Image: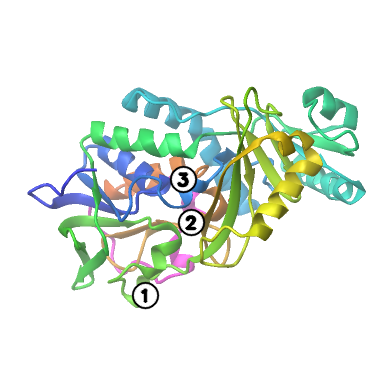
C-alpha cells in the first residue's frame, strides 16, 4: 500500500480490495490500463479474509438456481488458468487444490436430502458419485462410524483466500497498478458521468469506476439513487482449527449443517453460518453450532486447537446472482453481490470487468449478471 501518486488520475479506479476488486484491478492493469484500488483497510481485510475459499460448484449446486450454477461452472473452468497466470506474475501461490469434495449424510434425514441432491446433480450432468458408508470411510477414515453415505464430487476444490489476496496485491503492483488506503470514498458524478472518487486521502480522477465494495456496496457515498446496487449483508461465522500434523480429512467435507475445508499445512476451516445480519460479531451460539456440526461428521475435530473465530459479511442480491456490468451512470461499473461465491467467481468477473474497461463486451456467460435486471439500465453506450 503506497501513498497516492502525484498524478491522481487513472483510466480506472476500483473501490474495494476484496478478492473481487483485486482480481478486477489485476486484470485491468494486465490489459495495459492505469488502475488504482482504494480500500479503507487493505487487501482481503473484509469477507475475503474470512472466506474458506471453496471452489465447489458441484457440491454447492443446491445453493441457488441453474443460472448461478452455470456461472459458477464457467468461472471454475477459468480458475486453473487464472491461478497459473497469477502465480507466474506474482511469484506466489494461492493454494489451489482440486481436492474433490464429499457431501456426507450423517443420519437418515440427511440421506434423503443427499439422494435428492445427487439426482439433481446427475440431471445437470455434474460428476457426482453416490458412495456407501464404507466407501466414504475408505476415502476418509476419520469420518464418524455411523454416517449413512455420501456423494463424491471429484472436480471441486479450494484456494486459500488470504494467500490469494496477497498474490493479487503483488500482481497488481507488478503490472503497474496501485493499492491505496483511503477512507470514506465518495463517487463523483458530473452530468450523468463518473469523473472519479473523492476520499479523505484526496481525489482520484478516473474514466471508469468499478464498485466492488462487497456488502458495503450500497452504502458508498455519491451513488445516484438509480445506481445503488440492491445488496444486503448475510453474515457468516467461521472457525479455523489447527492440527499439529496432517488434517483429519483430505478433501472438503460437507453436510447440510457445515462444510470443512482441510489444508495441507494442518489448518481446518469450518463454516459457515447464514444470518440475515450486518454485524460481524462472533457469537457463542455460532461457534457451538459449527463445532457440533463438524464433530458429528468428523469427531477428531474435537481434538484440534481452536485457532481463530471470525465473521464476514457476504454481499447478497434479491435474486441470488451477482451484479457485474455497466450501471445507469456512464463510467460506473458494478462488480458486487457475489454472496457465497466471490472467490469462485473472481476469474470470470475480473475478465468481464476488464473487457468493459477496454470498451469490449463481457463474455456471454456473464449475461445473467447484467445489473439492468435490478437497477436502471445504462442510458448511453459508454466509451472506453
Ligand atoms: N462459500 C460458502 C460460504 O459463503 O459460506
Spatial CA span between label 1 and label 2: 17 Å
Dot label at residue 226: 1
* Quadrant housing residue 170: top left
In the rendered structure, which disc, 3 or 1, sits on the residue that comes first in sequence? 3
In the rendered structure, which disc, 1 or 2, sits on the residue that comes first in sequence? 1
Query: Cβ of disc 3 within 8 Å of ligand 1?
Result: no
Whether 265 is drawn above or below 367: the answer is above
List x then y, in percent, for residue 83.
44, 29
Whether 258 is drawn above or below 134: the answer is below
Q: Which residue lies furthest to the left in this view?
A: 6
Q: Specify the color scheme.
A: rainbow
State the residue position of label 3.
49
Spatial CA span between label 2 and label 3: 24 Å
Residue range (magenta) = 361-384
Q: How crowded is mark 2: few (under 14 residues within 10 Å), some or many (20 or more)?
A: many
Q: Determine the main secondary structure of the stretch shown in magenta.
A: loop
Please identify the quadrant where the N terminus is shown: top left
The residue mark sitting in front, 3 or 1, is 3
State the residue position of label 2.
369
Spatial CA span between label 3 and label 1: 31 Å
Residue 62 visible in this rendered orientation of the protein = no
Q: How many labels does the image show?
A: 3
Residue 138 visible in this rendered orientation of the protein = yes
Dot label at residue 177: none
Tag 1, which secondary structure?
helix
Tag 2, which secondary structure?
helix
Q: Which residue is drawn at 85% across and 43% down?
A: 106
Tell whether 263 sits left or right of 196: right
The answer to whether the residue labelled 3 contacts the one labelled 1, judged by CB atoms less than 8 Å apart, is no
List x then y, in percent, for residue 64.
65, 55
Amino acid at each position: 500500500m503506497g501513498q497516492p501518486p502525484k498524478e491522481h488520475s487513472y483510466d480506472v479506479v476500483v473501490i474495494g480490495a476484496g478478492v473481487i476488486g483485486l482480481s478486477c484491478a489485476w486484470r485491468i492493469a494486465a490489459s495495459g490500463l492505469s488502475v488504482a484500488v482504494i480500500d479503507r483497510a487493505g487487501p482481503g481485510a473484509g469477507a475475503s479474509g474470512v472466506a474458506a475459499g471453496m471452489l465447489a460448484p458441484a457440491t454447492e449446486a443446491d445453493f441457488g438456481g441453474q443460472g448461478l450454477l452455470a456461472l459458477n461452472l464457467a468461472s471454475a473452468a477459468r480458475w486453473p488458468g487464472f491461478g497459473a497466470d497469477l502465480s507466474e506474475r506474482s511469484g506466489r501461490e494461492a493454494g489451489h487444490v482440486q481436492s474433490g469434495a464429499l457431501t456426507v449424510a450423517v443420519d437418515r434425514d440427511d440421506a434423503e436430502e443427499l439422494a435428492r441432491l445427487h439426482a439433481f446433480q446427475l440431471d445437470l450432468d455434474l460428476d457426482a458419485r453416490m458412495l456407501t458408508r464404507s466407501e466414504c470411510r475408505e476415502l476418509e477414515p476419520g469420518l464418524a462410524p455411523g454416517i449413512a453415505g455420501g456423494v463424491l464430487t471429484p472436480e471441486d476444490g479450494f484456494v486459500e483466500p488470504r494467500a490469494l489476496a496477497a498474490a493479487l496485491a503483488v500482481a497488481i503492483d507488478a503490472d503497474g497498478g496501485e493499492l491505496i488506503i483511503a477512507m470514506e470514498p465518495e463517487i463523483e458524478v458530473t452530468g450523468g458521468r463518473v469523473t472519479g472518487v473523492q476520499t479523505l486521502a484526496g481525489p482520484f480522477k478516473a474514466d471508469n469506476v468499478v464498485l466492488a465494495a462487497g456488502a458495503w456496496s450500497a452504502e458508498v457515498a455519491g451513488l445516484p439513487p438509480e445506481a445503488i446496487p440492491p445488496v444486503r449483508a448475510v453474515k457468516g461465522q467461521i472457525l479455523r482449527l489447527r492440527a499439529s500434523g496432517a488434517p483429519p480429512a483430505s478433501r472438503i467435507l460437507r453436510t447440510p449443517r457445515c462444510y470443512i475445508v482441510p489444508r495441507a499445512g494442518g489448518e481446518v476451516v469450518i463454516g459457515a453460518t447464514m444470518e440475515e445480519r450486518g454485524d460481524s460479531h462472533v457469537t457463542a451460539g455460532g461457534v457451538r453450532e459449527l463445532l457440533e456440526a463438524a464433530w458429528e461428521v468428523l469427531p477428531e475435530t474435537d481434538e484440534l486447537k481452536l485457532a481463530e473465530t471470525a465473521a464476514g459479511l457476504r454481499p447478497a442480491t434479491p435474486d441470488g446472482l451477482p451484479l457485474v456490468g455497466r450501471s445507469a451512470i456512464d463510467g460506473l461499473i458494478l462488480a458486487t453481490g457475489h454472496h457465497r461465491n466471490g472467490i469462485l467467481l473472481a476469474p470470470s468477473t475480473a475478465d468481464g470487468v476488464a473487457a468493459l474497461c477496454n470498451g469490449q463486451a463481457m463474455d456471454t456467460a456473464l449475461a445473467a449478471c447484467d445489473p439492468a435486471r435490478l437497477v436502471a439500465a445504462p442510458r448511453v453506450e459508454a466509451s472506453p
